[in-house]
Image (cartoon, helix red, strand yellow):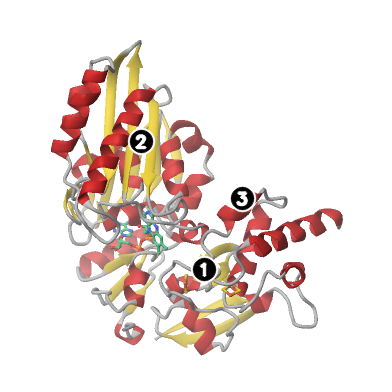
Amino acid sequence: MRSDVRDYTLTAPGSLNAVLSALAANPRLTPVAGGTELMVALGVGRLGPHELISLHRLKELRFIEEHSGILTLGAGTTFTDIRRNATIAREFPLLVQTAAWTGSIANQNRGTLGGNIANASPAADSPPALLVYDATIELVSANGRRTLPYGEFHLGYKKTVLLPGELIYAVRLPCRFAKHRQYVRKVGTRNAQAISKIALAATALMDGATVREIRLAGASLVDRPARLHATEAVVLGKAITPELRTLAAAALASEIKPIDDIRSTAKYRMAVACNLLDEFLLSL
Amino acid sequence: MSIITFTLNGSQVSVDAPPMTRLLDLLREHLHLTGTKEGCGEGECGSCSVLVDGELVNSCLVPSLQIQGATVTTIEGLGEQTHLHPIQQCFLEKGGAQCGICTPGMILATHHLLEKHPAPTLDEIREGLSGNLCRCTGYMRIFEAVQQTAKLAEAGK
Ligand SMILES: Cc1cc2nc3c(=O)[nH]c(=O)nc-3n(C[C@H](O)[C@H](O)[C@H](O)COP(=O)(O)OP(=O)(O)OC[C@H]3O[C@@H](n4cnc5c(N)ncnc54)[C@H](O)[C@@H]3O)c2cc1C
Ligand code: FES
Ligand code: FES
């Protein structure tokens, strides 16, 4: 059953400060950015929050800028904005790739990076790319700002550190991955416009045959977007040999906890995750 | 209720509606422009596609308050029965429309695609229209209609 829209309120104060004050005054307010998650819930009668506040077109949240080797993306950056940015294409190609397969063009024109992160789905496409680029995240509320490593933002299934009245302000990426080997692969029902069954993103810095730095993160492998630290530890400082690949696969298999759901099975996800990891290691 | 004022197909309109009304319903039920179709209602099919400030969006996922002050183009704004838009003419000639449910969305997605890629490759066409599902044509005739439009535009330069 569709929801009755008359039961919902929405305001659009028009500046970030006004939005933050409104959120501080009424903690029940839920932000709507591009609406590509929330409006789906509304359409099927499952939108819980009834008091909404719009972040759409807040200039303070929609920007991409580079300063002393740090690229900052405002939470209101759309996937289309990401795909059109030359610096991101040069420094962070995995982010362009994940933006390109986040739904259709129409979805990319509206959907935002902040919405993708805040929605906190373990299947979301951008978080693994942000994690392997060592992102930090900046949050803002009427009380001020705080910055933390993005890896500490997700606490569990759909649980984040966001406090009532707090918004994601921006994500920052250090521009130091150009020399890293970079990998991302999404396995879904079809190439375009399908939520992934699983995905793996990776960056690694090689020193001859030795892995100097490695970062791995996946979609739908654990209950939240997260780095795969145990697997990384097995590979770090080593050369890629058949024995090491076996050890890495074993570490991955014990570290991930894929589930059965409408899109796939735990068994399939486990097998494919190990294959994707092996594909990346063989490419190093 | 909110007064929502925006430019629709070149004319300014004001509608008094609940602010979370889907743009799709604002167009069809409040403004009686039924060219924009509803398929899935959840962002998957593209039959509700319209242009907002020149960008392709699914109107089933846009809360109406967010189009305050924007420019919206629907299929009714593209051409008329007596004077079809070239994209419409090419869909007609190439058999790019059968039942017609997907057609308004396909045509607006094509319009958006050709703005960005005036001479699109087949891959660009596939990507540009990947959010628009068609259960009738099998897509090939739609792709041909898009190519034909691009060719005519190039020849007309
Ligand atoms: C057809 C379709 C296909 C899709 N395919 C994919 C896909 O392949 N991969 C994928 O990852 N996602 C996909 N999505 C999901 C969705 O498009 C993305 O998650 C998108 O990034 C959501 O952003 P939004 O701005 O539209 O979010 P909204 O719906 O506006 O908000 C989502 C959540 O984030 C909160 N929020 C938004 N902005 C902020 C902020 N700045 N601070 C704090 N909270 C905030 C909202 O309160 C809400 O809880 C798809 C959706 C559809 C409809
Ligand atoms: S009705 Fe909007 S995308 Fe299907
Ligand atoms: S013509 Fe019938 S769905 Fe496309």
Precedes in sequence: disc 1 or disc 3: 1
Q: Residue farthest to the right?
A: B156
| Mark 3, residue position | B124
Vertical relation: A175 (above or below) B14: above
Numbered disc 1: secondary structure? loop
Determine the image quadrant of residue A207. top left
For the residue marked with disc 3, what is the amino acid? Glu
Vertical relation: B67 (above or below) B28: above
For the residue marked with disc 2, what is the amino acid? Leu
For the residue marked with disc 1, what is the amino acid? Gly
A237 or A240: nearer the viewer: A240
| Mark 2, residue position | A173
Marks 1, 2: nearer the viewer: 1
Residue B46 is marked as 1
Vertical relation: A14 (above or below) A139: below
Residue B119, image x and y in percent? 72, 50
Residue A196, image x and y in percent? 35, 51
Whether label 1 lies within 8 Å of ligand 2 gets the answer yes
How far is mark 3 from mark 2, CA to CA? 29 Å
Residue B83, image x and y in percent? 80, 78
Whether label 3 lies within 8 Å of ligand 1 gets the answer no
Numbered disc 3: secondary structure? helix
Q: Is the residue at mark 1 from the same chain as the one at mark 2?
A: no
Q: Residue at x 61, y 67 (%)?
A: B106
Is there a contact, CB below 8 Å, between mark 1 and mark 3? Answer: no
How far is mark 1 from mark 2, CA to CA? 33 Å
Determine the image quadrant of residue B77. bottom right
> What is the chain letter for disc 1?
B
Mark 2: give few (<14), some (14-19) or many (20+) Cα within 10 Å. many
Q: Residue at x 37, y 71 (%)?
A: A39
Q: Residue farthest to the top?
A: A208
Side of A90 where A264 appears, left or right:
left
